[in-house]
Image: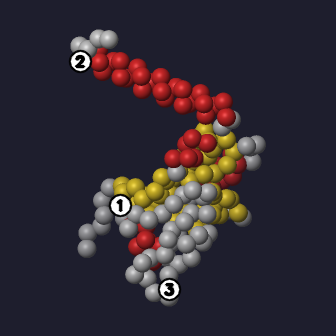
Amino acid sequence: MPREQGRKLVASNKRARHDYAILDTYEAGMVLTGTEVKSLRAGRASLTDAFAHLDRGEVWLYGMHVPEYVNGTWTNHAPRRTRKLLLNRREIEKIAGKLNESGVTLVPLSVYFNNGYAKVELGLARGKKTWDKRQDLAKRDADREIARVMGRRRKGITS
């Protein structure tokens, strides 16, 4: 059977990009059971309230919800179990050094399949203040308005 090619997005954490300023991103593999993989391939996962934590030189993912596989039997997995993440030793050491800084946390940004392997994109993040969030929304609205005006100008519509 040929292996899947390309990248297939399963779930993304849009709230994380709103609440945090992403400093750096990492791609990590996940240690999963068979029914978890089947449930992910069906596109069923949620990253709300999920976070990653460094514990004794290993990175663990907490709070990611992967619902039980519908056609599974008694061997089904626990939906919110802790999952081990697979990273290179150098990456783990780099993450550990940055997590020692004040206010920096490790947040999952998306879960996807890359050439048939389940991956999670982790972001080293620093929390945004309320005014930062408002400033980002205002900037996005201004950019959208500029694009709208430029599109009208290009089409020859003036108002």
User: Residue 120's spot in the image, x, y percent?
Assistant: 50, 57
Q: Contact (CB < 8 A) between labels 3 and 2?
A: no
**Which residue is pictured at 42% across the width and 78% down the height?**
70
Kind of residue at badge 2: Lys
Report helix, strand or loop for mark 1.
loop
The residues tagged by marks 1 and 2 sit, at their Cα atoms, a distance apart of 42 Å
Work out whether mark 1 precedes mark 2 in sequence or the reverse, and give the earlier one.
1
Q: Is residue 117 above or below residue 131?
A: below
Q: Where is mark 3, residue-wise?
A: 75
Q: Where is mark 2, residue-wise?
A: 155
One can see residue 88 in this view = no
Q: Is residue 130 left or right of residue 151?
A: right
**Which residue is pictured at 54% across the width and 31% down the height?**
137
The residues tagged by marks 1 and 3 sit, at their Cα atoms, a distance apart of 26 Å
Q: Is residue 21 left or right of residue 97?
A: left
**Which residue is pictured at 74% across the width and 48% down the height?**
100
Circle nearer the viewer, 1 or 2:
2
